[in-house]
Amino acid sequence: IYDTSSINKKDWESLIMNHFNVTNLEDLDIKGKLYSIISTGKLIDYLYETQKDSLKHINRLEFYDSNEYMVLDINTRINLELNETIMTRKKKGALIWLLDKTNTAMGGRLLKNWLEQPLININEIEKRQNMIQLFVDDIILMDEIKECLKKIYDLERLVGKISYGNCNARDLYSLKISIGMIPELKSLLIESNKKEFIKLGMEMDALKDVFELLDKSIVDNPPISVKEGGLIKLGYNKDLDELKKASIEGKQWLANLESKEKKQTGIKNLKIGFNRKTGYYFEVTKSNLNLVPDHFIRKQTLTNSERYFTEGLKEIETKILGAEDKIVELEYNIFNEIRDKIKMQTNRIQRVSKLISKIDVLNSFSQVAYQNNYIRPKLNKNGVIEIIEGRHPVVETTILDGKFVPNDTYMDNKDDRIQIITGPNMAGKSTYMRQVAIITLMAQIGSFVPAKEANICIVDRIFTRIGASDNLSQ
């Protein structure tokens, strides 16, 4: 039991309220929940102590109530091979491998979360089923949404990097590309004429102002480093434009000076070079040293040539390098300003990311259902599990020879509470038992299931014990 005698509960409450900018804990759904307050306070305190930076992207608190989700202990997750197979410990061959047709990284993470936390609220499950049904009934829309999602980067990760201040210009460019797809996604949902999709589309913030800021400021294909220039577009900042103009003019001056000195000296292969150590110089090969004029000042001797400078070249060098140094410094400052402006929109970006993740997972379930001929299961609270021609979703996909033989199942809370399954080794006893559990689990995450018909009782737990005597109970 956790000893709370030495803990000042009020201090943790103040820390939490200050961080989330609320006046009471009711807004966070943890008022009066002592252990939630202690754990949240300690976690926020630890993050502030270790990160030494802004935590603005952590802006909401979701209270997890175990009574809202099916209980799946670690052994059940392993034996049902939800995330990895027992034999290879790899994703391929596990249930998530079959179900994961997501197109975004955040959608993939949400799918894993749904798979590990099946719902027990029929209304919430049916909301997911309704969305999947709409996609399955309109495969053109399903494919259009899929193609749109493919062009969206990991918004959750990007906004985290921006909040921490360790993003670069390529991250902002990726954010722009992603946000640029939102209007198309929003239009597809609204124009679908399906009220569930229209509602999602209306809720989706197009982030037009964020896109416009990034579009007019950050160059396409920016460099990785933010301290070497080349980040900001012409036309965004007047002072920066003037410096870039001076730098460009300086390089034109160099070209003119090189042409002028070639004519005056008669050295046809005379050229102006540059390196960071010595700056700009005239390079003359050994065979032309007799043509070097008096106003050339020796700068460096090489094996096959001599390097010189003139007062005119030195003057141009000062202008060019001075402008380039100022450009780099100013671009870095402008980049930081843009990043801070984006940081202020963290909440909006996160809300959009959450909606996109949900659409991605539902679209993934729809693709799997359509491709594998899954059906929408009925749901009940009467203790009845009735499956007609059920199939193990992974085994039927990976089987090499022949066709998976479907099986019927009937269980209830009365005379059919227990089934005794017998047969020789490798006869399919474990596959059959896992099949029933997986179909039940799939139904409760909102997915369609591999069967001809299915009427699934909402259960609050699945537990397994696979061994010498296989056993599965629900």
Image (tube, grey):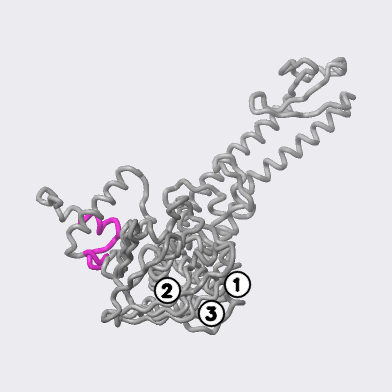
Residue 251 image point, x, y percent? 73, 38
Magenta-highlighted residues: 13-30
Residue type at the position of mark 2: Gly
**Mark-to-mark CA distance, 2 and 1:** 20 Å
Q: Quarter of the image holding residue 26?
A: bottom left
Q: Give the amino acid at mark 3.
A: Ile
Dot 3 falls on a residue whose secondary structure is helix
| Disc 3 + disc 2, Cβ < 8 Å | no
Q: Main secondary structure of the magenta part?
A: helix
The residues bearing labels 3 and 1 have C-alpha atoms spaced at a distance of 16 Å
**Which x, y percent locates residue 316?**
70, 32
Q: Nearer the viewer, residue 297 or 422?
A: 422
Q: Secondary structure at mark 2?
A: loop
* Residue with the mark numbered 3: 190
Q: Mark 2 highlights which residue?
A: 446
- Residue 413 relative to residue 102: left or right: left
Mark 1 Cα-neighbour bin, 10 Å: few <14, some 14–19, many ≥20: some
Q: Is residue 344 above or below residue 329?
A: below
